[in-house]
Amino acid sequence: MGSYSSSTEKKLARMRLRGLIKKEIHQILRDPSSIGIAFFLPVVLLLIFGYGVSLDAEHVPIGIVIEQPGPETNAFVAGFMESEYFNPVFFQSVQQAESALLQRKIMGIVWTRSDFTRRLLGGAEAPIGVIVDGVDANQARIVQGYITGVWMKWIASYAKAKGKLLSVPVNIKHRIWFNSAVRSRNFLVPGLIAVIMTLIGGMLTSMVIAREWERGTMEALLVTPVRIREIILGKVIPYFFLGMGGMALSVFISIVIFHVPFRGSYLALGLASALFMLTAIALGLIISTAAGSQFVAGQIAIVITFLPAFMLSGFVFDINSMPLPIQIITYIVAARYFVSILQSLFLAGNIWPIYIVNCCYLAIMAALFFMIIKKKSHKRLI
Amino acid sequence: MLRRILALTIKEFIGILKNRKSRMVLILPPIAQIIVFGYAATFDLKDVPVAIYNEDQGEISRQIIARFKGSRVFRIIGGLQSDDQISPVISLKKALLVLHFHEEFSKDILKGGHGDLQVILDGRNSNTALIALNYVHTIVADFNRSWAKKNGVGSSPARLITRSWFNRMLDSHWFIIPGIVALLTIVVTLEVTALSVAKEREAGTFDQLLVTPMTPFEILIGKSLPGLIIGLVEGTFIIIATCYWFEIPLRGSLLVLYSGLFTFLLSAIGIGLMISSISLTQQQGLMGAFMFLVPSVVLSGFATPIANMPKFVQDLTLLNPMRYILVIVRSVFLQGAGFDLLWTQYIPMAIIGIVSLAIAGFLFKRRLY
């Protein structure tokens, strides 16, 4: 190398890098699966998720058993008929209802005994039996809440009709900020973008270096004057732009098709996405360098990118409620920071302290990952 | 024929297990994941940070705050002095919710019989916000009941007596962890099978395999067995961890559970091999596995219920084997269900398995391109 002047050397370096990028782009274009994962997957997933995934239960099938109907029970049942949360199904006996619950045809049972009206009018506390299917505990709790709501409404109007004062000393008035309609889609969709971007960055790049080793093309590259830094840059740059394209598409779909409000700045979003993309790609490259074979690389990629992004990012499950050791683990999941940034930018706007702290974490992770890559990569045969 | 299949199976196992790294990725992650995800995946909240803005001088707000202090769910991070402090404390995620007692709160209750408690929640994760709000309602309802009792004012004429079946404490771990059995099993099985044909295609050895006396059917079985065995072993490991580490009751029979696991593995292997035989390279195999895996996890009912999805997506989930195994695993664990309740779940998985295996075998010799 010493024989070249430094300006020629720079020019040659640029040329080599351009050549590598060109080669990588050809490889991406020739293999439809890369394009697929960058563009097809986000679109399909966002559509399915946006339309399909919701934690808001509606039209819950619920069994109703009224052993002795009367005007009082009719008013109570009417509450369930009117509610959009329920789809009431009537049963003659509680045994029938219980067997329907066992077969998972209904999510719960509301049951009044034959002496209900008598006890109600007699002034004794009349019991209403409620059974919920606890297999899905989260849904069960939501259904319980809905049933309580119907019951409270009925009690209030019953007491009013009887001219009784019903004692409800403390009345809760709640306001839910940033998502007042409580649409779970509004937070699931931005979270999903983070999961998809993790996939794209990690999956696309995890195999690219392992592939070169496995096919023997790495050895061919090694005998050329290409530097290790150039090989890495040649991998990062094309996949970075591919990933950012997928990102832009995802944001577009979230806003235009799903009407998720976007209250922050697009510039901030772009910057954070670029940082996250670099982290994801760097992680993919580390996997690729460490794995050696595509089989191992692919498996590691699934295990340390997709599943943690899904489970440990705070995208569905609340990080604060996890046990402390698990919370510590979430700090090394890059998606955690990106989910936080996205949910804030989409729903709350530019909350700079949150934005900057999370971006710093992402930048530190990216820098760390690239340092590891530099140390791990070598221009020699294993 | 049996000897040929056995030979191929052994060769596949050697291919998977000879390399130390590839052995490790099959064994270590499931152990780490069942532990980490088992603890992480919960919808139950604890240590929810609460800020209190108390303008009230009276006794009642103090009693209510004491109840919040005593609750395991909430952690009080401090008091606010003015309206302007509410917004930053919520926006910066210092608190998930703010309880606001206005000046006349206690007075209103003592004089007029009722007062309003304002609750402001961070809705960025609206599910968490709703769950937290439910907890607030529970605490306040308890307070109301004891207040009514103490002051002898009209208690409610009818009351709800709620029981929840199968999971009395409504612990959401009981719902999620049996689901992880299905999740990790399908991940491992797809990993093993989705690359198995593609790897040989890439190396060119698959053509060699095709010119041996082995029929596509024999190749199919030889390629399926490693996935089946590895899937069963890992599934068993995770089931043991579910029962003994997380102490989730296994109320049904192992026969029902394992019949489900076996049928499920059959469908997962079929899909994995189908993806693999369409693919020309390992990268394509892996991407294909992913494009199947991600939607099938998301649309399986693992974290969000299928019943909440719109009709056409619900119909789409009928093609997803994970949907059925989740019902089987959860029903067997929590409900103790038998074949009589679950037979409708086995049949679709078996059909998916047979059809996809047939397509995979068909594609061995006839590539699409």
Image (tube, coloured by chain):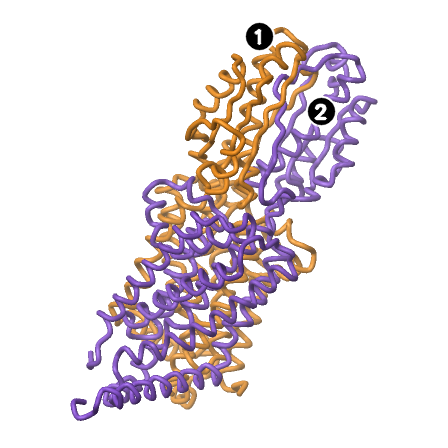
Q: Amino acid at mark 1?
A: Lys
- Location of the C terminus of chain A by quadrant is bottom left
Question: What amino acid is labelled 2 in the image?
Answer: Thr
Chain letter for the purple colouring in the rendering: A
Image check: A366 left or right of A37?
Answer: left
Q: Read off the chain for label 1.
A: B
Q: Nearer the viewer, residue B227 or B70?
A: B70
Vertically, is A227 above or below A145?
Answer: below
Residue B136 appears in which quarter of the rendering?
top right
Q: Position of residue B94 (x, y in %)?
A: 44, 38
Can marks 1 and 2 be said to lie on one chain?
Answer: no
How far is disc 1 from disc 2 in space, using C-alphas? 28 Å
The quadrant in which the N terminus of chain A is found is: bottom left
Residue sitting nearer the eye, A98 or A120: A120
Judge the density around disc 1: few (<14), some (14-19), many (≥20) Cα neighbours within 10 Å. Answer: few
User: For the point 55% across and 23% down, which residue is it?
Assistant: B101
- Mark 2, residues whose alpha carbon is within 10 Å: few (<14), some, or many (≥20)? many
Residue B323 drawn above or below residue A162: below
Instruction: Identify residue for label 1.
Output: B150
State the orange chain. Answer: B
Which of these two is toward me, B264 or A189? A189
Does residue A143 lie above or below B347 as drawn?
Answer: above
Residue at the left extreme, as displayed:
A2
Residue denoted by label 2: A112
